[in-house]
Image (spheres, rainbow, N blue to C red):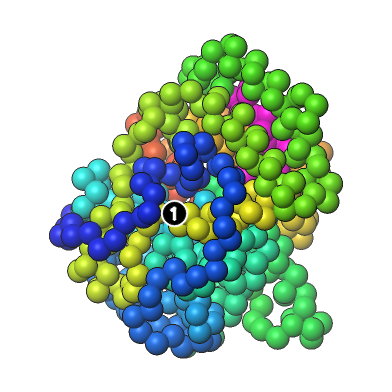
Amino acid sequence: MLLTFATALLGAASVVPVLGGQVPAPDGVWGAAYSYPKVNVESQLKQSATTPGKLRVTENSGVCETTPGVYQASGYGDIASNESIWFWFFEARDNSDTAPFTIWLNGGPGSSSMIGLFQEHGPCRLNNDSSTISYNDYSWNNVSNMLYIDQPVGVGYSYGTLDVGTSEKAAADIWTFLQIFFSDSRFSKYQQHEFALWTESYGGHYGPTFAAYFLQQNAGIANGSVSGQIINLKYLGVGDGLTDPLSQYPGYISYAASNPYYPLVSSSEISAGSEAWNETGGCQDQIKACYDGGSDDTCSAAQDYCNNKILSPLAGNYDVYYILSEDPDPYPPDATSYLNNATLLGLIGAESSWAETNYDVYYNFAQTGDWMRNSRPDLQTVIDSGVRTIIYDGDADYILNFKGVEAMVHNLQTQFSSEFNQKLFTNWTVEGKPAGIYKNAGTFSYVRIFGAGHEVAAYEYGTLARGQAALQMFSQIMSNQSLYST
């Protein structure tokens, strides 16, 4: 099934986007944190009046989801008179009245969740021509109601005053948005459904921080100190995520030297990266200083140093999101022209031009040093609260590679960690075909997925279709089950 729109471009990012990217590369350095003035401006001119505390909704646009009878809606939640958050909702293709309710967040910080929708696991997938879309048989709305959100304000189609520079502030804004969403008569029925948060990349911060905040707000509602509706949080999924930099940064060194495919750089470059990690005042010491009550400047300096000395140089000439290609890999296709098409904007009710990443939002986070702060304690809180949690990673991703992610998982201190660490990895198959390796312990799971890059659901492996393994993973967790082979 193929849908086509004209390719007229309404707007473009101020910085040329990196295809398939969620981590900005200022001046060619991945994740750099150079000094940049804090932004507090209107990101886009508003084209209609906001309605604080309400949704503005366009229903059944016919874009992307073409399954007969499946409802969709897109639009804005106005969390303030000058802050509007974009959403795109697709009900489940089957049993939407009982299926769980999932929000999806991409990372950056500053990157649009339309990446997940159009490049990964939405009802349609952008084709390599960047101007047409195809029906996605392996969409995650096969089994869940799906809500894709552009956040913080200023990201993607969202617009307004850019005043978010920490994961904690972003969490508060999304909680406010969800209160508005579940108060709307069109969506209030979903408030009782099992709620899931799935995210990737900088979502290693967003996922644990947001989930812990939702639990905190729920407790406040229960004891009367907070006014609002319960978020019925049951599931958390984090893919290729940055959670605990102190555990994860040595992974750049080990992955560049030894991964399932080939070394990324020379032995001398590996040695230089190791020295930058170990030397007095080096990356390790700077991250520790950040963790130990470090100021914004301390944590921001650690981000800049470590990404200049370790993350960026050890990628070599390979695409940081998919090392089986040289940099830049043209896949996944760039969505900029498609998502700025005038016809499309009118159909879905979008009121701003779209860019993959808002660099002003990114720099607001860089100034606070949020990147190098540790989200592992929040992750531990969420796991120990009984929320079924999965961490997953593609084995061809460098920028948040499995060496670092598995070190973070190994260092977790939860009720399931001892059992998890004593287990050996088990082969994971999809319809009898190799797809990865995994471990389960209690309500916690981890899987390393073969042949996948940073955006796990965007890839295929062997004879498995693109996104097939990712859908099996998602479906099993969302059925409140541990991972298992089929």
Closer-to-camera residue (401/183): 401
| Amino acid tagged 1 | Thr
Q: Which residue is painted at 39% across and 43% down in the image?
A: 18
Tell whether 137 sits left or right of 274: left
Q: Position of residue 295 (x, y in %)?
A: 77, 52
- Where is the N terminus found, in terms of image quarters? bottom left
Where is residue 148, by image quadrant? bottom left
Tell me the residue at 51%/64% (across/down): 151
Which region of the structure is painted magenta?
Answer: 237-255
Q: Residue 385 magenta-drawn?
A: no
Q: Secondary structure at mark 1?
A: loop
Q: Residue furthest right?
A: 292
The residue lying toward the viewer, choosing from 299 and 395, is 299
Q: Which residue is mark 1?
A: 357
Disc 1 residue crowd, few under 14, some 14–19, many 20+, Cα 10 Å: many
Residue under the image location 71 percent in, 20 percent down: 275
Judge by depth and name the residue closer to the eye, 193 or 333.
Answer: 333
Residue 449 vs 266, above or below: the answer is below
As drawn, 413 above or below 425: below
Res. 430 visible in picture: yes
Percent position of residue 347, x then y:
25, 73
- Residue 424 figure quarter: top right
Does residue 243 belong to the magenta stretch?
yes
Q: Tell me the residue at 29%/61% (across/down).
A: 11
Q: Is residue 302 left or right of residue 392?
A: right
